[in-house]
Amino acid sequence: MAMYKLELPISIEREGNWFIAICEPFNVVSQGKSEESAVENLKEALELFLNDEDVLRQYSTKIKKFVVPKKEQYVSVEIHDWEDTAPIRSGSL
């Protein structure tokens, strides 16, 4: 069986002493005492959820939207003081 990498959007909220990590596209939520542990717990929950055969069938179309093409590589970078005022264009720059 082939293995695929997904890049999924998440959000993190704080509730008291806990950090809550949420992946809205699949309605999966987890928590941890730190942001890092909440994200790690969410990753584990997503892997368990998305490796279920019934879930794979039910969410097949949605999963395809988040698959990273095998021949492409990505790097995550942070930018500061940028205002999102222009529409994002797809394709080459």
Image (tube, helix red, strand yellow):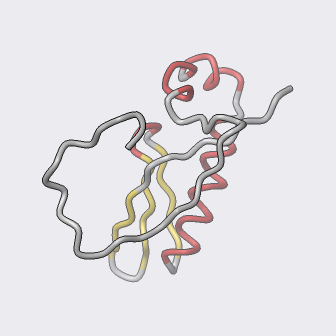
Query: Can you say which quadrant of the picture contains the N terminus?
Result: top right
Query: Would residue 47 appear left or right of 32 to someone viewing this image?
Result: right
Q: Nearer the viewer, residue 65 or 25?
A: 65
Query: Would residue 8 appear left or right of 81 to someone viewing this image?
Result: right
Q: Residue at x 42, y 70 (%)?
A: 78
Q: How many marks?
A: 0
Query: Can you say which quadrant of the picture contains the C terminus?
Result: top left
Q: Residue at x 44, y 49 (%)?
A: 9
Q: Residue at x 34, y 73 (%)?
A: 14
Query: Would residue 87 appear left or right of 72 to someone viewing this image?
Result: left
Residue 83 lies in quadrant: bottom left
Against 30, residue 56 (above or below) is above
Q: What is the residue that sits farthest to the right in this orientation? A: 1
- Where in the figure is residue 25, as x and y percent of width and height? 42, 38
- Where in the figure is residue 33, as x and y percent of width and height? 51, 79
Q: Nearer the viewer, residue 81 or 32?
A: 81
Against 31, residue 47 (above or below) is above
Q: Residue at x 49, y 75 (%)?
A: 35
Query: Would residue 54 appear left or right of 59 to someone viewing this image?
Result: right
Residue 18 lies in quadrant: bottom left
- Where in the figure is residue 54, as x and y percent of width and height? 65, 21
Q: Nearer the viewer, residue 45 or 2?
A: 2
Q: What is the residue that sits farthest to the left in this orientation? A: 85
Against 65, residue 26 (above or below) is below
